[in-house]
Image (cartoon, coloured by chain):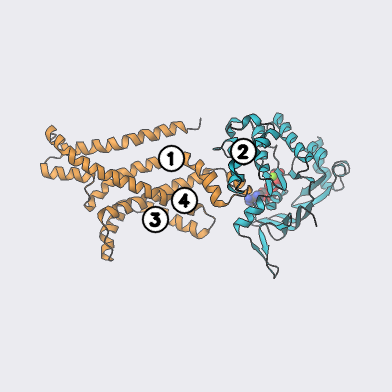
Amino acid sequence: MDFQWDIFVEAIPALLGGAWLTIQLTIISVAIGLMLGLIVALGRVSANPVTSKLAAAYTTAMRGIPLLVTLMFLYYGLPSAGLQLSAFTVAVIALAVTNAAYVAEIIRAGIQSIDRGQMRAARSLGMSYGLAMRRIILPQVVRRVLPPITNESITLLKNTALVSTIALSELLRSGLEVMTWKANTFSPFAGVALIYLMMTLPMIWFVSRLEKRYAIP
Amino acid sequence: MSHLIRVSGLHKSYGPLHVLKGIDMTVEPGEVVCVIGPSGSGKSTLLNCLNFLEPYGPGEVWIDGVLVGYEKKPDGSMVKVADHKLNATRTAIGIVFQQFNLFPHLSVTENIIEAPVRVRKIPAQQARDKARELLAKVGLADKASAYPSQLSGGQQQRVAIARALAMEPKVMLFDEVTSALDPELVGEVLGVMKGLARDGMTMFVVTHEMAFAREVADRVVFMADGEIVEQGPPSEIFGNPRSERLRNFLGRFRG
Ligand SMILES: Nc1ncnc2c1ncn2[C@@H]1O[C@H](COP(=O)(O)OP(=O)(O)OP(=O)(O)O)[C@@H](O)[C@H]1O
Ligand SMILES: [Mg+2]
């Protein structure tokens, strides 16, 4: 074991810089993933068979392709087709479109878990499908899907580590850089692991709070 | 020509299952019509076709002079109407369901004012005043800010009636609204419905409560196997049933 306290301390500023990029990637990708996931979920439950099939194909494909492959495809594959995106943009797109597939499945299950009578009652009062969704169905769905969606966000945060492969100095890559520079493995990685935990623990705690609060007695 | 509801030649199938087999029926303004019949005879299906919660066809359903769910083209063909027109038609028809279907995330008052405010664009304050009036009418003035989960089944069903009335419908449809209630709670809901009938509301009531039908109905419709087998004043239907099927059906309630 080559842990050295002084290298550990010296590494922290660089690691925090990486962590900040990780946080940015997470927040932006989660936000886009949520919006895209909601749209896909609404497409999935719509009465229109074309929309529904398209949405199903999307969730199936994106859950079946490894994130790393999506990342590589966008970063190395697209330029060969003449489209060169920045590493940050590629990272956000890959994380968000993958996250959206999982979010969509969670929201779809949430919508379908709401009693059919709710939609019937809303429609019988003259509400349009969209209004009934927005005012009656989705507010009830939010409570049910908040815990699994927070879990998905934790997964996304951890998956940002894969982005280190496309030359973005997020937290893991910052650790790798310190490792090379100081010729010491254990100290920077102890810091990396600790900082990941510091970011995920509050979210894990939040989920367990939510689950207790909305638990069906 | 002043029929409030006119159903003619109405058919409805679920896939290969032919549920409604040519229903002809009218309901006049202010009339209370009770529909009775064995389970699976198509009573709920008929009620759901009246406001196009279930698409029907062939056949026609007219409510207050408006063809429900379809538009007639000059060549006689029927095409589905745009959603917003259907929504407008639906505001004229109140429905109360067996399972109450109150919105659990909204308070009693919010349940009642949601559609008036969002659909009919009535100012929120005016809708609240109206909700208070309606809650008093169904005997729940003190529950305005409660949530559905805090109410008994009978109370929830009375809120559901108030919610439907808030849209000022021309006709109220009831689908076995007391079937999910504990026996001791049935009376309070039927009481509210009797009050409505007295006030002159046009009502179409699917029910297993024979005593209610006998007392409140102007006309009783007996359905079996997707057809109207017999209809007439309660005294005729209960006192002098003509068809074998109706006699068998009523026999089960005498026990
Ligand atoms: N959504 C549906 N899909 C397929 N079949 C249905 C559907 N709804 C009803 N049915 C069938 O249509 C027939 C008539 O059902 P309906 O609910 O109208 O009967 P009902 O007279 O209301 O009976 P009950 O007294 O039990 O409520 C039944 O055979 C039922 O199984
Ligand atoms: Mg029924």
> Does the residue at mark 2 contact the one at mark 1 (Cβ under 8 Å)?
no
The amino acid type found where label 3 is placed reads: Ala
Give the labeled residue for mark 2.
Answer: B128
Chain letter, colour cyan: B
In the picture, measured across the screen, residue B34 lies left or right of residue A146, that is right
Expressed as whole percent of the image width and height from the top left, the position of residue A209 reads: 41, 32
> What is the CA distance from the residue labelled 2 to the residue labelled 1?
32 Å
Foreground label between 3 and 4? 4
- Horizontal side of A121 relative to A176 (left or right) equals right
Question: Residue furthest toward the right?
Answer: B240
Instruction: State the separation of the CA atoms marked 4 and 2.
Output: 34 Å
Beta carbon of the mark 4 residue lies under 8 A of ligand 1 = no
Q: Separation of disc 1 and disc 4 at Cα?
A: 15 Å
Give residue A41's mark: 4
In percent of the image, x 83 and y 49: which residue is there?
B231
Q: Nearer the viewer, mark 4 or mark 2?
A: 2
Above or below for A127 versus B191: below
Dot 2: what SS?
A: helix
Q: Could you tell me residue B149's position as x and y percent?
A: 58, 32
Chain displayed in orange: A
Q: Looking at the image, is mark 2 or mark 1 nearer the viewer?
A: 2
Q: Are marks 1 and 4 in contact (CB under 8 Å)?
A: no
